């Protein structure tokens, strides 16, 4: 008999607690769970091409994601935003986000928890080659999502990731830092919201940890503690990097209870209005 999601995640729990992340290979069924999302993306990209009169290959999801999408944004970058906002509303995507297996993973990794899905904390990233403005640089999830201190990021790719596509980079064991203060700086690239937050004494903290960048393929699931330092790798390939993220949190965790499970940027709130003690002046700490 195949293992349950709960038992798979229970086996990973000691590693997760120690390293602040875990990789569950082929946790989702690539055919049953992921292929319908691919098809949903294909149909949307095809429709946007038709709408704007762009002639590009969309016969397969792979063509739509890797050929038609770059062709669209090369013509007009805002059409990419239209697709980005649309794809997170594909029913098959929401079925993955709300999959019962996710609650089981959360309960196995956070014994005694009451799992919640972070509203606004789910989406599909499309990281284009060489595009720095929207890259997720080193951060902890907690300030940009809040909800509860012991939340978990679920991260799963829609295309097989190669090293040059910039797999997510994780500072192994860095959840041990606890909550790291942050300061705001747009770094001269017009970054806003979570993209403008920077870790206090970032390089000094990162120097203590080994950075890993697991290569994953559709169906694989990467789980990260809300306090683990991580960043999106640089996409140096010629292919847009399509990946899914969503977050679960714990209704029973005391800090979450204290802040009323409020969210952060994705919920239209600034973290500093909810937890002012997290913000520092640059270089002040
Ligand atoms: O892989 C990436 O681009 C980073 C995504 C991220 O920070 C997250 O999933 O929370
Ligand atoms: Fe993140």
Image (spheres, rainbow, N blue to C red):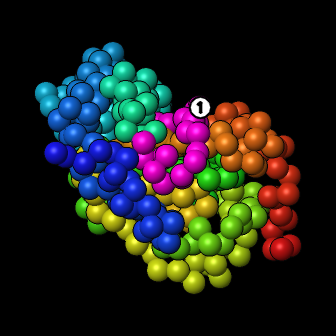
> Could you say which is closer to the camera, residue 82 or residue 18?
18
Asked whether, in this view, residue 9 is left or right of residue 269, the answer is: left
Q: From the viewer's perspective, is residue 22 above or below residue 148?
A: below
Asked whether, in this view, residue 142 is left or right of residue 110, the answer is: right
> Could you say which is closer to the camera, residue 244 or residue 99?
99
- Taking the magenta stretch, the answer to whether it contains residue 127 is no
Asked whether residue 167 appears in the rendered view, the answer is: no
Label 1: few (<14), some (14–19) or many (≥20) C-alpha neighbours in 10 Å: some
- Taking the magenta stretch, the answer to whether it contains residue 119 is yes
Q: Say what secondary structure mark 1 lies in.
A: loop
> Could you say which is closer to the camera, residue 34 or residue 112?
112
Q: From the viewer's perspective, is residue 108 above or below residue 203?
A: above
Q: From the viewer's perspective, is residue 247 above or below residue 139?
A: above
User: Over which residues does the magenta segment extend?
Assistant: 104-123
Residue positioned 45% across, 67% down in the render: 14
Query: Where is residue 20 drawn, in percent x and y?
Result: 51, 66
- Residue that badge 1 annotates: 119
Query: Where is residue 230 drawn, in percent x and y?
Result: 52, 63
Q: From the viewer's perspective, is residue 186 above or below residue 77?
A: below
């Amino acid at each position: 008999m195949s293992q349950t999601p709960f038992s798979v995640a229970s086996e990973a729990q000691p590693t997760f607690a120690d390293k602040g992340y875990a990789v569950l290979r082929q946790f989702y069924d690539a055919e049953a769970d992921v292929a319908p999302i691919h098809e949903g993306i294909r149909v949307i990209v095809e429709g946007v091409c038709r709408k704007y009169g762009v002639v590009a290959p969309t016969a397969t999801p792979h063509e739509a994601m890797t050929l038609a999408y770059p062709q669209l944004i090369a013509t007009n970058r805002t059409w990419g935003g239209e697709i980005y906002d649309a794809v997170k509303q594909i029913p098959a995507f929401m079925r993955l986000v709300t999959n019962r297996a996710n609650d089981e993973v959360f309960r196995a990794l956070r014994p005694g928890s009451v799992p919640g899905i972070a509203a606004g904390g789910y989406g599909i990233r499309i990281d284009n080659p060489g595009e720095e403005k929207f890259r997720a640089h080193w951060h902890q999830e907690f300030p940009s999502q809040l909800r509860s201190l012991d939340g978990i990021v679920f991260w799963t790719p829609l295309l097989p990731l190669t090293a040059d596509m910039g797999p997510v980079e994780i500072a192994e064991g860095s959840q041990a830092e606890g909550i790291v203060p942050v300061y705001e700086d747009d770094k001269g690239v017009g970054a806003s919201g979570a993209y403008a937050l920077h870790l206090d004494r970032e390089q000094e903290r990162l120097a203590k940890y080994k950075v890993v960048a697991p290569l994953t393929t559709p169906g694989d699931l990467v789980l990260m503690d809300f306090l683990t330092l991580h960043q999106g790798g640089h996409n140096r390939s010629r292919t847009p990097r399509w990946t899914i993220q969503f977050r679960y949190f714990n209704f029973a965790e005391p800090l979450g209870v204290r802040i009323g499970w409020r969210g952060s940027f994705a919920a239209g709130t600034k973290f500093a209005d909810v937890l002012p003690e997290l913000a520092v002046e640059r270089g002040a700490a």
